[in-house]
Structures are given as C-alpha cells and as structure tokens.
Image (tube, rainbow, N blue to C red):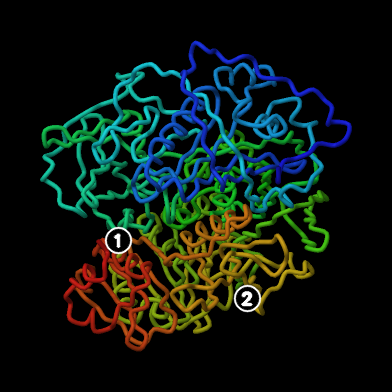
C-alpha cells in the first residue's frame, strides 16, 4: 500500500509484539467498518514522530454520515480514556466532524502502553506494519531505536501523502451517563464531547487533562440565567452563576457561553464586538471563537473556557466548571517532544532566536499543532519571556510579575529555553548557528525574532551613570528608584519615552521631556490629537522642551547632575531615560546569506519566509506584505503583530500554507487614559475628529484620499475594535462615512 513505511533489513523480521487480548466483556457486539478514501497517514522519518491525521471524504456529507461520524467519534472518545489525546475541529457550528487528530501518548514503557490500550482492538484498526507508527511515543525504549528507511514524507515537516486505508473499529460499551448538551440546547451523542466542540483541555500549568462531565458534580455549577427571548441574535450578556461569571451569546439562533474576561488584561468582553463567529476584545483587539473559545487573533497566549448551555421550558441554563469560571482562561492542549532530548546535542529541528511574542507564540503553536520534535528557543535575556509593553507603564514591576509563562510550562511541553545566549552568526548554507559562548547548533527550521535595539544618542559625557535605555525589568526598577523625589529627564517623544514620563510624574520631583518635533506624536496621530496629549502631560506637571536636542550630560563624581541642550538650556537631572527610537537587532546576520534592506530589516513573504530555505522571521526585525495596503511591505513594531508573525511562521514550518491576514492593533496608556489604534496610517492626509478633544473623549479617523486607513480613540470603546472588524472583512470605509458623525455605517458594514 502506498505510503506504508518499511523498516531496515535487520528490522524487518523482528517480531512486533501483539496487543493483549481486548476485554471482550467491555466490547460492543457491533463492529462498524468504514472506508475513507481520503484518509491521510502522517508517517515519520528517524527524528520525527507525528500524529495520525484523518480527513473525511466528501461522502461524509451524504445521508447517513451522521451515524458513521458518531461511531467514529465514540471510538475516539473511548481511546481518550485509554491514554490517548484527542482533539477535534468542527465546521459551521454543526456536529459534522470534518477532521480528527489522534495521538497516542506513551505511559512510561512499551508494556504499560500496551496495557493502557487494552480494550481497543487496534489490531483490526491499524495494519501490523503501520502499528508502530502509532505506538511510537515519548518514554518508550523502542522509540529511540526503531527506524524507518523509506522517504515517506520527504521530511518531518512536509505534507502527508493521501493513502487509502480501510478502518475497522470495535466500539467499547459505555456506562450510561447523563446527556451532554451542545451549544444549541440539543443532546449531544458524544458523552465526552465538551461544549462548543472541544474535547481536550489543558490546565494553566500546561498539563493535559480530559474533561469528563458529571463525574464530579460538586465541581460544577448550574444556573438559569435568562429567558430564551431575552437575547436577540447578535447580542451578548454577562451572567452570574454564583461562583463566577460567563459571557452568554446568541448567534444565528443558537446560544453559547464562554469566559467573560479577555485572558490578556482582563477586559470585559461583553463590551467588545461580536462578529462572524468571534468576539473581539474592546481594549486590545484579541479575537476569540465563540464556539470553541480558541484565540484567533492577538495579543495574548491563552484561550477562553467554554460552558454547556441548554434550553428548558424557555429558560437558558448554563452548566460550568467552577475552576474554569474562576480562572477565565484556558491554555490549548499541546504535544510533547517524542525524541530523547540531550541538551548538549548541537541539533534542533526548530531553532527560535528570540523569546519575545513572535518566538514564544511560534513555539507554542508548533506544540499545539502536534509537532513532536525538538524545539530550542534562545534569548539574550536572563529572564523567562515577559510582558515587555508593561516595562514603561509599570516601572516597579519585577520580571517574575511580568513573566508570560512559568519555567514548569516550558519543561512540560519540552520547549528548551536557553537564557543569556547571544547568537553571533548564522550560516544558511550549512544551516548552523554560532553562539558567543562557542556553542554551534544545526537546525532544520529557523525563526529569527530578535526584536529591536535602541538607537544610540550622540552627546558628550557618555561616561556618567544613571542614563538608561529602557530594555529590562532591572532598568525599569532602577529608573523608578533613582527618580523618587528627584529630577527626571526623558529624551525623545516616542511612545516608550512618553509612557515613562507619565509613570514618573507621581514619583519624581520634576519630569522634563526633550523632543525634536514641534508636537509629540504628530507624525502618527496628527497635530490636533498630539496637542491634546501634550496638554494632558502639561496638566500633570510635565515640562516640554521641543525642537531641541541633547548636547551634553554633566555629572558629579560620575553621577548625572545636568543635561545640557543645544539651545543652551541646562536641566537639572538625577536620572535620564533615552527613548529616541529603535532599529532591528539583525547585525549578526550580515554574512548569513539572509537578505536585509538598507535599514537592516529582513523582507519576508506572506508566509513569513525569508529568501533562505527553512528560515523564517517575525516581529520588529521584518518588513512584511500588509493586506490592507495591497501587500506593500511595511515594518510594524507592535506587540500584537509579533504574535501573529509567530503563529503564521509556525504553521508554515508545519507545512500548512498560511498567509498573514490581520489588522494592526496598537495601544498606549498614560495617566490612566488609553489610546487605541487600528490600521496603518502612514502617509495620511487628513484627520476627521468625532467627540470632544478637550474632554479627552474622541475618535480620530485617518484618511488618505477618500479612504479611511486608520482610527484612534480615547474613552470611545469599542469603536476601534469595530473599525478593526470592518478592516478585517476587507470592506472599505470612505471619508464621507465618518464626516457626518453618524456611526450607523459600522452596522451597515457588517460588523454584526
């Protein structure tokens, strides 16, 4: 049969141990036999252990497919209780199961695995020659020694070849369990099926767990939350279940319930935007599927929990796990590395340079998608990945308070994190990376996500202390400590510089800001909005020295005491923060063979690939094709955008062709006021303001010719998220649409 692996000669005659006899008392007397002509068997090469991938045929949409799918899913649910991890995807909110991914997880040794699978007639399910494809798993002695020589897939990350497989399933008898309700209130035929279509669940610590509804009733809470007619289609309501809240949604005639807070910063999703099967966060634009709770657009790493919904006597009833109600977030299930890991080995299937959002999301996405080979992530930082945007807003936060994932998380999912590791060179011809400490590592796939580095400032007196480029939590902590009741000077009106200035006003004796422009942010937000922000700062005791530059830093006994401007003005200063912008951290790539532009940015394709085979890049270091600008290559150094880059890169590493399609979304916070921004406004020629600038409640539409290209707001939620939905749908917002002040055009553009 095409695609069946054949072992080396010395292995062919090796006796493959048979499975122990199934517990026939637990088996149904009915055996179903299905033929799926388009089933794909994902096999593996020596270093690759992959899950089995099933693709249902077109015949599954014909009459009678529901029974076939029910039987197949029932078998998989039984398999999950025997030690398998099962993940299912659903299409159009219906119980038409389109694809099933099954991965058998080892339990320590081969005999234990065999015992765990007792009760599943795998001998009739998988032909003997293919059986080792599913029994290869972490922890098994045979996993490291068994090899196949045939080039089945042409590589562990390539696409599967379709093969015909006849699948014979023996179904387990199941004890009678209470009915499980699907999101539309109907009884689901799958007793282990989680609401909204998800079977697997991963706890916050990252350990895989299967939800078994009703086994522990005390862990669940159930409440009638409203009348069936209380919500119209397209409406959301935050409901209280006693031990926590949920977000109830009515969409296309069906109810569903998910977590009510965005896992990113806790924004109330009821104030967000419901559109096309997902809800968008009103604060930072993250999107979550209302059926599965999965995060679909960023920022953020975690998804939302989902809860069971049913309708009884016109009452909408939600049944929810208490722990999920309290946590309000869910980490997606992830695979683990099936290879024997030796940290001293200079080889990694995937090497990620940089542990910012692009690198972290790339690593997590690979594991979420079933990648089971070695992943190494290296960073120059001494800390685990942390929330860098908070550095300039919360100067006293520690690295532990800012960290995005725990050390246990990386250990659990076999993502090797190497801290304080600086890469000095890359050679794409030999696929090797050289580190400063002498370590040399080979790779199959490489992601470059090294972020940015501050632009140096030229001035006299560079030897004085207490001058900072804000890069680390230690920098932020030192700035806050040294500025306490002292004089602080900020050089530059970048967003980081202005955020630091705002954060210091309640600590420092004085705060001065030096800028080269006439008005802060005029290039990005326009003159009117820039003046409004400048006035807000001046009201909070910040003094500006615009159209000016630093000439000299003067110290006393090595400590900063004065900042001298080119205008001749001398400012008292005990601490200085330089925020004059940053450039791509790509100097180590000059002799690598990877193309870079004159500014040091790496041009990438829509799939985040560079010119070099197997090399991807993302985050601040790239220029990429922006869909909203007719695929013009742009650099967008946003936290949200880096998340997207990491996910797209990971999917393409796995062989799933995915193009970047997202709307840039940015935010900043100063004096308790947030400015939200969506789109790409470079080169705007007009700004249409709605609202009141003096009251700090406004929305600004940035137009180019007759088209709106970006939007910014303050105290006007969720207008930016609504506009982002319109941009994301590919629809055009005309200048005339926003000039009248009538916002009904948002509904007309199809955001509901």
Circle 2 — which element? loop
Q: Most extreme residue toward the top, as rendered?
A: 25
Callout 2 crowding tier (Cα within 10 Å): few <14, some 14–19, many ≥20: few
Image quarter of the N terminus = top right
Asked if one can make out residue 206 in the rendered structure from this viewpoint, the answer is: no
Q: Which mark is residue 519?
A: none
The residue at the point 49 percent across, 10 percent down is 25
Residue 125 % position (x, y): 59, 30
**Lower position in the chain sequence, tag 2 or tag 1:** 2
2 or 1: mark nearer the eye:
1
Residue 204 % position (x, y): 46, 35
Q: Count the marks: how many? A: 2
- The answer to whether 617 appears left or right of 404 in the picture is right
145, 724: nearer the viewer: 145
Q: Which residue is mark 1?
A: 673
- The answer to whether 512 appears left or right of 410 in the picture is left
Residue 621 % position (x, y): 61, 66
Please tell me in which quadrant of the rendered image residue 110 appears.
top right
Distance from disc 2 to disc 1, alpha carbons, whole Å, reads 33 Å
The residue at the point 78 percent across, 63 percent down is 428
Circle 1 — which element? strand
- The answer to whether 545 appears left or right of 20 in the picture is left
User: Relative to 620, is 549 above or below?
Assistant: below
User: Relative to 120, is 42 above or below?
Assistant: below
Q: Most extreme residue toward the right, as rendered?
A: 10
Q: Which mark is residue 458?
A: 2
364, 46: nearer the viewer: 46
User: Relative to 172, is 593 above or below?
Assistant: below
Residue 274 % position (x, y): 27, 56
345, 55: nearer the viewer: 55
């Amino acid at each position: 049969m095409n695609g069946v692996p054949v072992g080396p000669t010395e292995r062919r005659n090796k006796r493959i141990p048979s499975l122990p006899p199934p517990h026939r008392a637990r088996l149904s007397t009915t055996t179903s036999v299905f033929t799926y002509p388009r089933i794909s068997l994902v096999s593996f090469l020596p270093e690759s252990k992959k899950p089995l991938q099933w693709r249902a045929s077109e015949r599954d949409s014909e009459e009678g497919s529901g029974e076939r799918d029910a039987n197949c899913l029932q078998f998989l649910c039984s398999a999950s209780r025997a030690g398998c991890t099962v993940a299912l995807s659903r299409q159009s909110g219906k119980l038409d199961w389109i694809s099933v991914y099954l991965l058998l997880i080892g339990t320590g040794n081969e005999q234990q695995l065999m015992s765990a699978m007792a009760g599943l007639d795998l001998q009739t399910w998988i032909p003997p020659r293919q059986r080792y494809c599913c029994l290869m798993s972490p922890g098994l002695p045979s996993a490291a020694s068994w090899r196949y020589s045939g080039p089945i897939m042409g590589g562990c990350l390539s696409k599967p070849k379709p093969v015909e497989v006849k699948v014979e399933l023996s179904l387990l008898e199941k004890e009678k369990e209470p009915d499980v309700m699907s999101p539309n209130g109907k009884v689901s035929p799958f007793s282990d099926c989680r609401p909204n279509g998800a079977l697997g669940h991963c706890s916050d610590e990252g350990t895989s767990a299967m939800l078994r509804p009703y086994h522990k009733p005390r862990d669940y809470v159930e409440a009638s939350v409203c009348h069936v007619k209380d919500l119209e289609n397209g409406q959301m309501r935050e409901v209280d279940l006693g031990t926590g809240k949920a977000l109830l949604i009515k969409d296309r005639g069906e109810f569903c319930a998910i977590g009510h807070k965005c896992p990113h910063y806790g924004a109330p999703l009821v104030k967000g935007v419901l559109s096309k099967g997902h809800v968008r966060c009103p604060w930072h634009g993250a999107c979550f599927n209302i059926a599965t709770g999965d995060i679909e657009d960023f920022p953020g790493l975690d998804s939302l929990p989902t809860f069971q919904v049913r309708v009884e006597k016109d009452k909408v009833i939600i049944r929810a796990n208490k722990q999920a109600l309290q946590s309000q977030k869910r980490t997606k299930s992830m695979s683990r590395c099936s290879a024997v890991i030796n940290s001293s080995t200079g080889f990694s299937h995937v090497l990620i340079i940089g542990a910012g959002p692009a690198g972290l999301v790339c690593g997590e996405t690979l594991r979420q998608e079933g990648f089971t080979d070695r992943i190494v992530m290296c960073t120059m930082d001494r800390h685990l990945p942390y929330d860098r945007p908070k550095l300039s807003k919360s100067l006293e936060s520690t690295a532990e308070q800012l960290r995005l994932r725990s050390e246990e998380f990386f250990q659990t999912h076999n993502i090797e994190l190497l801290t304080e590791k600086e890469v000095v060179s890359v050679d794409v011809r030999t696929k090797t990376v050289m580190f400063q400490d002498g370590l040399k590592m080979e790779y199959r796939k490489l992601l470059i996500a090294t972020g940015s580095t501050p632009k140096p400032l030229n001035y006299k007196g560079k030897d004085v202390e207490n001058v900072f480029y804000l890069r680390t939590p230690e920098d932020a902590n030192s700035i806050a400590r040294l500025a306490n009741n002292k004089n602080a000077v900020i050089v530059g009106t970048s967003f980081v510089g202005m955020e630091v200035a705002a954060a210091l006003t309640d600590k420092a004796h004085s705060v001065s800001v030096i800028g080269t422009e006439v008005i802060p942010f005029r290039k990005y937000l326009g003159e009117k909005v820039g003046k409004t922000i400048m006035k807000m700062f001046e009201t909070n005791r910040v003094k500006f020295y615009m159209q000016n530059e630093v000439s000299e830093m003067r110290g006393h006994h090595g400590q900063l005491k004065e900042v001298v401007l080119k205008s001749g003005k001398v400012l008292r200063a005990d601490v200085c923060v330089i925020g004059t912008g940053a450039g791509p951290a790509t100097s180590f790539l000059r002799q690598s063979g990877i193309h870079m532009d004159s500014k040091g940015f790496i041009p990438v394709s829509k799939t985040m690939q560079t010119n070099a085979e197997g090399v991807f890049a993302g985050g601040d270091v790239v220029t990429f094709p922006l869909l909203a600008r007719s695929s013009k290559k742009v650099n967008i150094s946003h936290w949200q955008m880096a998340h997207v880059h990491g996910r797209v890169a990971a999917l393409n590493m796995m062989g799933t062709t995915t193009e970047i399609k997202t709307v840039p979304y940015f935010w900043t916070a100063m004096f308790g006021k947030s400015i939200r921004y969506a789109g790409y406004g470079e080169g705007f020629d007009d700004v249409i303001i709605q609202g009141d600038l003096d009251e700090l409640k406004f929305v600004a539409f940035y137009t180019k010719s007759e088209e709106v290209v970006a939007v910014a707001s303050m105290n006007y939620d969720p207008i930016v998220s609504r506009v982002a939905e319109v941009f994301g749908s590919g629809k055009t917002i005309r200048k005339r649409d926003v000039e009248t002040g009538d916002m009904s055009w948002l509904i007309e553009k199809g955001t509901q």
